[in-house]
Structure formats: structure tokens, C-alpha cells
């Protein structure tokens, strides 16, 4: 007989952005007494908040962190004996440190009602902008762009430009509508493909401004033309 608490939450979240701390995958083994209490603590010292519900799909706590840093989430489950607690660390970062290449304001210029598609447990698409950022950095690595130490470029190595913003923006729109599509050539699939074309256009014409030494300034040799895949002096 055993209790198996479970925590599901994004590993990275921005300050003041809504996050869902979920315990819906929590379960007990056969023979264990019924769960009488499920509690979630957003961060050590915040105090536990009860989320017990007859519907296991409602075992979650929506939250937002007002400060950056490592946050330790705890889920505590009680049956008829001593409660069992597990923890999970996530990282909360400031908007400045997140350095996303695009924003919800950017995509709203093309889809004024886009925020109505934000999933439950979220209040923005920052998580998709972060995914797009990671995809762009991965694509640059695949295309042969590396740092001076021959490692992957990080978000700190890339200075946001208009072309980069456009590339990211259209990638985000493509991802959002792709997720909502459930049939080939439905309205969401058509929108996703349209934004994918725009994404490709800006990917191939982008000129990156690189900051290899992380001083916040583009250096003399810190430029890359994506369309030619070559480094050029500026």
C-alpha cells in the first residue's frame, strides 16, 4: 500500500505569468485508504493550500510568482496516516532575463482575438514564445552558427532585431494554430500553413546581430546573414 503524489508544472516561468501547479496525476496503490486531503505549496514557506476535490481533474492550483529565482513546489497527500510529500524545483525568471524574441502584442497585431485561445491554466502565450526561441536557437546550430567556443548560441548571444522578431512571431502563430487543428485543411490548419510561409520568409532573410562576449553590444565581427549562411564584418 502506498501513496504516489505527482507534480506537473512548467520548468521555466516568467515573473507574474500564470502557471498551473497540477497534482492530477497523483494516485494511490490498491489497498491504500482513500485520499482525504491534497495540498499544494507554491514555494517553500508560502504555506500549503488545499485543493482536495472529488474530481481528480481539479487537483491543481493556479499561481503566479512575484519574484524570480528557484521555486520549490510541494504536493502533500494524506489518506488515513502520515501524509506523503514530494517537491519539484522550477525556475522563475524576469522578463529581461527571459529575453523572448517576440511577444503577445506582436502576434495580436495579426490575430486580434488570439488571447482567447490561451489554454486553461495560462494567461499568455509566453510559453510558446519561449518554445519558439529554443527552436530558433536549435535551427541556428543545425545551420552551423556557433559561439566562439564552438558551442550552441544562447539567447544571450543573440541581439533582437526586427527580422528575428518577425521570424519568432510567425513561428509562434504557426505553432498555436497547428495545435488547434484537428483535420487537414480546416481553418486552423490553413492559418498554420499561412504563418509557416511567413516564418520561412523571415528565417531566410534574417540578419542576426550576435553578442559573443555577452556585453550587450554587437561587436565588429558579430554579424551573420542567414540567407547566405556566412559571417560578415560590420
Image (cartoon, rainbow, N blue to C red):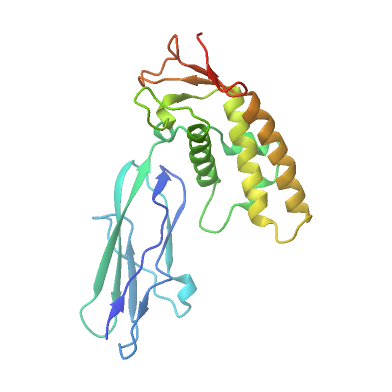
Q: Nearer the viewer, residue 34 or 9?
A: 9
Asked if 125 appears above or below 224 in the picture, the reply is: below
Task: Please state the total of marks drawn on the protein image.
Answer: 0
Q: Which of the two residues, 6 or 43, is positioned nearer the viewer here?
A: 6
What is the x, y in percent for residue 61?
Answer: 42, 62
In the rendered image, residue 138, in percent from the top left (x then y), is placed at: 49, 38
In the depicted structure, whether residue 65 falls above or below residue 229 = below
Q: Quadrant of residue 165?
A: top right
Q: Is residue 63 left or right of residue 129?
A: left
**Measuring 39% from the left and 36% from the top, which residue is drawn there?**
94
Residue 106 percent location from the top left of the image: 62, 34
Is residue 203 shown left or right of residue 85? Answer: right
Outermost residue to the bottom: 31
Q: Determine the residue positioned at 25% across, 69% down.
A: 85
Residue at the image position 56 percent from the left and 23 percent from the top: 229
In the rendering, at what x and y percent does residue 173 appear? 65, 43
Image-quadrant location for residue 62: bottom left
Q: Quadrant of residue 102?
A: top right
On the rendered structure, is 154 left or right of 136? Answer: left
Please tell me whether residue 228 is drawn above or below residue 87 in the rendered image.
above
Q: In the drawing, does residue 90 fall left or right of residue 193?
A: left
Q: Quadrant of the N terminus?
A: bottom left
Amino acid at each position: 500500500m502506498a501513496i504516489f503524489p505527482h507534480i506537473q508544472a512548467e520548468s521555466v516561468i516568467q515573473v507574474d505569468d500564470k502557471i498551473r501547479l497540477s497534482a492530477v496525476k497523483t494516485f494511490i496503490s490498491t489497498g491504500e485508504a482513500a485520499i482525504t486531503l491534497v495540498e499544494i505549496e507554491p514555494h517553500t514557506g508560502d504555506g500549503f493550500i488545499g485543493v482536495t476535490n472529488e474530481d481528480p481533474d481539479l487537483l491543481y492550483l493556479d499561481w503566479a510568482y512575484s519574484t524570480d529565482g528557484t521555486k520549490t513546489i510541494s504536493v502533500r497527500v494524506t489518506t488515513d496516516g502520515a501524509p506523503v510529500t514530494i517537491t519539484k524545483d522550477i525556475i522563475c525568471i524576469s522578463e529581461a532575463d527571459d529575453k523572448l524574441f517576440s511577444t503577445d502584442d506582436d502576434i495580436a497585431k495579426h490575430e486580434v482575438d488570439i488571447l482567447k485561445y490561451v489554454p486553461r491554466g495560462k494567461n499568455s502565450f509566453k510559453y510558446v514564445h519561449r518554445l519558439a526561441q529554443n527552436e530558433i536557437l536549435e535551427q541556428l546550430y543545425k545551420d552551423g552558427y556557433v559561439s566562439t567556443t564552438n558551442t550552441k548560441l544562447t539567447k544571450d548571444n543573440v541581439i533582437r532585431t526586427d527580422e528575428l522578431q518577425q521570424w519568432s512571431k510567425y513561428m509562434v502563430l504557426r505553432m498555436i494554430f497547428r495545435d488547434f487543428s484537428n483535420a487537414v485543411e480546416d481553418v486552423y490548419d490553413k492559418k498554420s500553413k499561412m504563418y509557416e510561409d511567413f516564418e520561412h520568409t523571415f528565417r531566410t532573410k534574417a540578419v542576426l546581430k550576435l553578442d559573443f562576449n555577452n556585453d550587450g553590444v554587437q561587436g565588429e565581427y558579430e554579424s551573420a546573414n542567414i540567407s547566405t549562411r556566412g559571417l560578415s564584418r560590420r
